[in-house]
Every structure is written in structure tokens, then in C-alpha cells.
Amino acid sequence: MKNYFLFILLFYTGIVEAQQFNVGIRLQKTHQMYWENGVSAQYSFANFKPDRLFVGFDFVTSRLGTAFNSNALKQDSYIFSGSWHFFKKRQVHLVGRLNTGYLTTDLEADIFAQLPSSAFLLAPEFGLNYSPKQLPFSLNTGIGFYVNMLEESKTPGTFQPLYYHLTLYYKLFENKK
Amino acid sequence: MKTSLKNILIAGPLFLAVFLFSACSDAPEINDSLLDGNVIFDPSLYAPEDYLVSAKYPNPSAEDLDKHILIASHGYSASTFEWQEFVDWSADADYRVSSLLLDGHGRSYEDFKASKWEDWRAAIIREFELLENLGYTKISFVGSSTSGALLLELMETGYFDKHVKPKNIFFVDPIVVPTAKLQTIVDIVGPMLVYLEVDQPAEEDKYWYRFRPYQTINELNEVIQKVRKGLEKGIVAPSGTFIKSFHSKFDPTASTTSTVLIYKGLRLSDGNKIAVQLMDSEIHVFTRLSLRPSVSALERSNQQDVFAQMAARLN
């Protein structure tokens, strides 16, 4: 219970200190591979590079994409990111972003237990962000490339490098000062 | 600061574009010692009767027709050499092996470059239908690497519904997803690369294309994507056909995930799953050991294991 209150306190303190806090849905397609969709959140600090530097977390899964009601492999990606918005005073920002995280694939059958089923993620990404001032929404799109950090045969075959995504954010909090 | 940032944003992509285009390769330098050239061709083109059962026995007797025929087909950029060890190993067997050459292969770089995956598949259909029309009823397949995908494609499209049902289909390191991560972006970078050169021993240059035109890699990607999507929807094997996939645990070319996808997406006609065996191996098409720089006892054992398992189902 104590931890719960501590979490709530930190959460709301964070919001108060936020310049922007956005949550949204993310649609992602890996080139010549799966659709993996999920959720996204990003946060900009009020006192440090407001509206320029964003930290974020994304969760995308093929369960909400190609693997939905099909024989495709179920795989989940947990992605932490830092992004920098260029031309922040305009409605359309150029975005440079660095992602890191973890991918895990469910190979299901015991006979495949010894095969590679996960990979660390590291991906530089470039994109655009459209953020109309009069609306509580922003639209973010990007194209990224996963850098392979292991011998290629030691990662799942469904982990492929080039991806593109479209994320629609709702501005849960925005400091307009 | 703003000006320098703009300069970087404009000059960066321009520099990258110039660099990529300056790195473009023209046609490869092909000499007569390569399969890619116009001197060395696959021997099955000169003497098909030494490779194809349909050519060797154009008028089969009743005794011939009673024999089990295994159609062996090789992978992308390879030739009949890939299954020659099994052909030799089977010299005294009751069954017969028809070792075919995929169209576009075993000829020249230009022939390869012009070929489509449907051409590669055509050689399989041609030999199968010749045998079928001659009256053979016991026909099986073994397909390595890309031929695994081609056989899956035939099942996906229901090709066997109106033909003799294969007794067995064996896959050896079948490809549905590639191991090489850059293979999936060849449709984007291919025109700049023109071709990929594979660093293979000189002896292998006589049996595998050394230069792989990007167009053929796109063809390969097209057929494996088609098969992957088919597996996602579900493919049912021909009635009564036994299917087994053998795959190296750490295949450097055809990701072992391919066999996971086949296992998930392909069902036998009785609803059961196919058989799978993962091999303790890090080589692609582990059944071909000839011309490998070194062969371990384990690799030899893997090969013999699969040869024996296939033979047991052909007698």
C-alpha cells in the first residue's frame, strides 16, 4: 500500500513537472514482416529542454497485428526511447529518436525451446511529428532501423531491421506557459 | 547554430545519396572458372538421363513403375551438386532419385538474372508431371532451402489436389524467413548494389553462382513472403503425405524460425502436425558436406541420419 501511494505521488509529481505527457496508440509495420501494434507514451520535462527532449515507452505486439487470429508468431517488443524535436515552434517537427529495448518471441512448442527467441533492440529513427496547437492530439510517424547486436543466426528470424510506425497521441497534459 | 543545423539536415542526406550512388556496382567481372560464366554449366543440362528418372527411363517397365521416386531439388543459386551425395549414397537402393536443376540455375549470370521464382518452380512441376504421366504413383520430394519454399507454395495453391499425392515431402533447412537481416531490404537497396558477391571457396564457384543479382534476391523474397502469408492462414498437406522438416539449429542462411513457422502453419491431411528434427549444426543445407572446408564427426552423423531416415521411407 505504501509503495502504491509512493507511486501515485511520484506519478502526479511527474505530471506537474511535465511540459507534455502524451499517451497514444502505435501502428507499426516491419518491412517484409509483421504488423505489430500497441501503445505508446512520451514525456517532456518542464525544466529541461521542454517540448524538445522527450522520453518514451512503447509496447508493440504482433498479437494485435499479424498474429491476431492467424498462425503468425506472437512477439512482443518493449521499447524505451529518447527523442529530440527540431523546429519545435512549428506545427510539424522533425524528430530524431533513439530506441532501445527487448523483443521476445513465443515459439510455443517445447521442441523449439533451444532456439533463439529474443533480441535486444537498438534503433535510430527519423520521423515527423504533427502537433496542431488547437487540438489535444499529435501525430507521430517514423522510420527506424534495428541494429543487429548478435550473430544473425542467434536472433529470431521474425526480427527484421527496417520498420515504420504511425502513432496517434492524446495530450494528457500540456504546460502551455 | 540554426544555419549549421539546416546545413547538416540538407547536406547529410545529399552526401549519403552521392555516397550510395558512387558505391553502385556495374555488372560483375565474371571469368570462365565460375558457374556464372558461359563455359561451365550444370552437367544435367548435357546429360539429363544421368540426373532425371523421366529422361533415363522414358519407357518404364512395370517393374520400373513400381519403384519409389524421390525428386530432389536444390536451393537458391545452387545446382544438382547439392544432392549429389545423396544420389551417390543411394546407388544400390531400391528407390530412384531424380535430381533436378531449377530453371534459371546452373547456366549463366544473365540466365539467372532473368529468371523468376515461377521459373525455378517450373522444373519441379515438369519432372513431377513427366513421372506422373509415365505412370509412377510412388513419388516423394526432398527440397533444400528455397526448394522447401517452392514445395510449400505448391501445397498452398492446392497444386496436388488434381495430381498424384506425394508419399513424403522432406525439407532440409527450408527458407521462409531469412537469417541475413539485410535480405529483407534488398528491394530498397538492390538497385544500388546491383548484385551480391558471395565469398565462397573456388571449388564451390563451379556449382554455385558467386554473383547473385538483386533481382533474384527480390524473387526469393517474393516467394518466401507468399509462403509465409500462406502459412499464417494455414496450409493443409496433400492427403496421406508424410512431411518432415530437418533444420540446423543455427542456420546462417535460412533462419530456423522458418521451421517453427512451417510447424505452426502446415497441417497433415489428418489434422496432425508435421514431424520436425532440429540438428546440432551451424551450416546451411547440412546434408551437403562435399567441398566443405572441414567436416566434423557430428556433421557427418547428421547427414547420415537424415539420409537413412529418408531412405527408410522410400523402400
Image (spheres, rainbow, N blue to C red):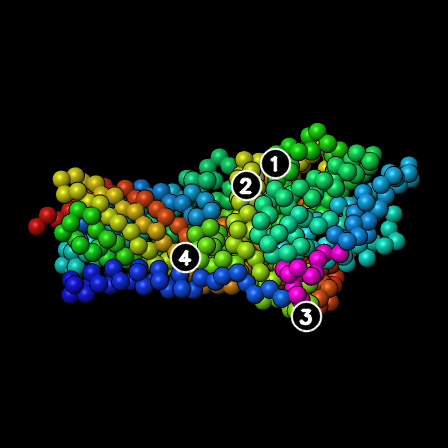
Secondary element type, mark 3: loop
The stretch of residues the image draws in magenta is B32-43
Secondary element type, mark 1: helix
The picture quadrant where one finds residue B123 is: top right
Going by the picture, which residue comes out furthest to the left?
A: A177
Q: Is residue A112 visible?
A: no
Q: Amino acid at mark 3?
A: Pro
- Judging from the image, mark 3 belongs to the subunit labelled B
Q: Nearer the viewer, residue B3 or A115?
A: B3
Of pointers 1 and 2, the one earlier in the residue sequence = 1
Of pointers 1 and 3, the one earlier in the residue sequence = 1
Residue at coordinates 35% horizontally, 42% vertically from top-left? A27
Asked if residue B92 lies in the magenta stretch, the reply is no
The answer to whether A71 is drawn above or below residue B22 in the figure is above
- Find residue B156 and name its label: 1
- Residue designated by label 2: B226
Q: Which of labels 2 and 4 is toward the front?
A: 2
Q: Give the alpha-carbon distance from disc 1 to disc 4, as whole Å.
A: 32 Å
Q: Give the alpha-carbon distance from disc 2 to disc 3, as whole Å.
A: 35 Å
**Residue B95's x, y, as percent?**
84, 46
- Residue designated by label 4: A146
- Find residue B293 and name its label: 3
The picture quadrant where one finds residue B268 is: top right
Q: Which of labels 1 and 4 is toward the front?
A: 1
Q: Amino acid at mark 4?
A: Tyr
**Majority secondary structure of the magenta segment?**
loop
Of pointers 2 and 3, the one earlier in the residue sequence = 2
